[in-house]
Image (cartoon, grey):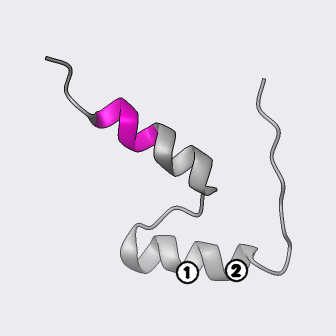
Amino acid sequence: MVNYLHDLSLITRNQERYASKQTIAASPEVTDLAQAARKPTS
């Protein structure tokens, strides 16, 4: 299960960043998990 926190004051800014730079707003914990998942296992 996932819980989302929507900060209404940031929605427009985040949408514009995604549209122009394909940057997704995420917490540091989520960013760390995503980077760890991308690392190749050897």
The residue that appears at 38% across and 43% down in the rendered structure is 35
Q: Which residues are magenta?
A: 34-38
The residue that appears at 40% across and 67% down in the rendered structure is 22
Q: Quadrant of the C terminus?
A: top left
Instruction: Give the distance between the C-alpha atoms of the residues marked 1 and 2, in whole angstroms.
Output: 6 Å
- In this rendering, the answer to whether 42 lies above or below 19 is above
Q: What kind of residue is marked 2? A: Thr
- In this rendering, the answer to whether 26 lies above or below 16 is above
Task: State the residue lying farthest toward the left.
Answer: 42
Q: What kind of residue is marked 1? A: Glu
- Identify the image quadrant of residue 20: bottom left
Q: Is residue 36 left or right of residue 13?
A: left
The residue that appears at 82% across and 38% down in the rendered structure is 3
Q: Is residue 24 left or right of residue 29?
A: left
Name the element at disc 1. helix
As drawn, the label of residue 16 is 1
| Disc 1 to disc 2: CB gap under 8 Å | yes
How packed mark 1 is, by other alpha carbons closer than 10 Å (few <14, some 14-19, many 20 or more), is few
| 18 vs 33, nearest the viewer | 33
Instruction: Find disc 2 in the rendering and name its residue.
Output: 12
